[in-house]
Image (tube, helix red, strand yellow):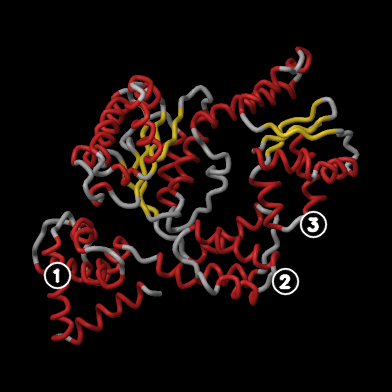
Amino acid sequence: MDANKLWISAKQKLKGSFPKSFFEIYFNEESIPIAVKDHVFYLRGNIRTKEFFENQKKDKLLEAFSELAANINDVVVITDLDEELAFFQTVDEENARNSAADERTELISKASNIANANLNPKYTFDTFVVGPSNNIAVAACQRVASSDDIMNDNPLFLYGGVGLGKTHLMHAIGHNVLERDPSKKVLYVSSETFTNELIMAIREKKNDEFRHKYRSVDLFMIDDVQFIAGKTSVEEELFHTFNDVFAAGKKIILSSDRPPRDIPHLKDRLKSRFICGIMVDIQAPDYSTRMAILQSKAENDNLSIPKDVIEYIADNVKSNIRELEGALNKVILYADLSSQELNLDTAKEALKDILVSYKTKEINVLRIKEMVSDAYNVTVEELNSKKRTKNIAFPRQVAMYISRTLLDISLPNIGDEFGGRDHTTVMHAIKKIEDEMEKSEMTKVKIEKIISDLNG
C-alpha cells in the first residue's frame, strides 16, 4: 500500500475538520508519511505531532483510513532518523528484495543524506518562484548544481536583502547535487552554527573533528557570512576552510545581505576570495512575482484564496518573500479565529496594524544607496569607494543624510556602511546636505523625492 497516496487521500477527507492554520501545521508542515506495515500507518514527525496523531486525533485519522477502505489499525509517529532507520531494518528479506522495499530504502538513504547536509526538504528549485528580480541568480545556481565542473563560478556568492530566497536557493543546489549523485558530501550551515560549533570545538579540544567535518566535503555552503565579520578567530577558521575546500577542487556557495566589498569589518583576504568566482544579487520581487509567490503558496497548501485578497497583499507587502507569506498566513488565521469569510475586507482588517511596519522594514542602507545611485547616475560601488570627485562625493553625502534621516542608525555605523568612513565625515556630509537643501530648491525637491519613493 502506498503510504504517500493514502496520506494525501486521508488529508482530503479531514481537511474540513480542522481550522486551516491548524491543519497546515499538523498535516502539511510537521508530518511526512513513511510506510504502511502490518496494518500500522507510520509517520515521521516531532513530539507535538506524535501526541496529536497517536493520542488526541488517532480515532479521526483511523476513521478516514476506514472510509478509504484501508485496513489500518494503528498510527505510529517516528520522531528521529535513527528510529526511522531502525524501523526499516526490521523489514524481512522478502520485502527487502521487493521493489517497493528497495524504493523505501532509497528514500531513507536520501533522507539520511539530506539530514546530514542540513537541507530543508521543501527548498527545491521546483518550489522556487522565478521572476525578473531573481532569474539570473536562479540560472547561476542551476548551472552550479547541474555540473561537477568548477569553471569560473567557484565560489558562487549570492547577495540580497533578508527573505528574498538566498537560503532557499542554497538548499535547492544541495538537493540537486544529491539527486545527481547521492554519494556526494554536501554541507549547508549558517554562519551562526559555524561560529557556535567552532567555539564548542575549541572549548572541548575537538578542532580536528571540526575541521574534518567542514573540509572533507564536495559542496560547502555557508549562509549569512556578514555575521562573521570582525570575529577574528571565526574569520581565520573560515579562511582556512575556504582554502582547503577550494584547493581540493570542491564547490563553495556563500550568501550575504550585501556584496563582499560592502561588508564592514570583513578581512580583505576573505573579501578577495569571496569575489574570485561569480557574484549574483537577488532583488525584492516585483508585483507579478509577488502575485505568483502567493498563488503558489495557496496552491501548495490546497487553499482557496480570492484573487482580490492576493492582489491586496501583493500590492502592499513589497519587501520580501518571507513577509509576503507571513501576511497571507496572518489573513488566513485571522479569518479562522474570527469566524469571518476570507475576503478583501477581512484581509484589510487583518493586516491594518502591520502594513506600516512592512513599509518601514523595506528601507535599509543598501536600498537608500540604490535609490540615490539611480537618481544621480552613479553606482553603489562608487558610493562605497574612496573617490572624492564631486559627481560621486555629493551623492554619497546625500545617501548618508537620508540614512541618518530615515534609519535608527548611529553615525559610526553609517560610516561603516560607506567604506569605513569615520563619524566626523558623516557629520560633515549631513551638515553639507542640510545647507544645500536650504540654498537650492532643486536639490531639496530631488532629495525629498528620493525619500518619498523610499517611503512608498
Residue at the image point whose x is 73% and y is 69% from the top: 339
85 or 174: nearer the viewer: 85
Residue 333 falls left or right of residue 204 = right
**Tag 1 residue:** 429
Distance Cα–Cα, label 3 vs label 1: 61 Å
Q: Which mark is residue 16?
A: 3
Q: Amino acid at mark 3?
A: Gly
Residue labelled with disc 2: 341
Secondary structure at numbered mark 1: helix
Tell me if 54 is positioned left or right of 195 in this view: right
How many marks can you see? 3
Instruction: Give the residue type at disc 1.
Output: Ala
The reply to whether callout 3 and callout 1 are in contact (CB within 8 Å) is: no
Amino acid marked by disc 2: Glu
**Looking at the image, which residue sits at the far top?**
93
Q: Earlier in the sequence, mark 3 or mark 1?
A: 3
SS at circle 3: helix
**Residue 243 placement (x, y as % from top left):** 27, 28
Element marked by disc 2:
loop
Percent across and percent down for residue 175 are 52, 35
Between disc 2 and disc 1, whose residue precedes?
Answer: 2
Q: Which callout, 3 or 2, points at the residue further toward the start of the chain?
A: 3
Reply above or below: 72 against 38: below
Query: Which image quarter: residue 334?
Result: bottom right
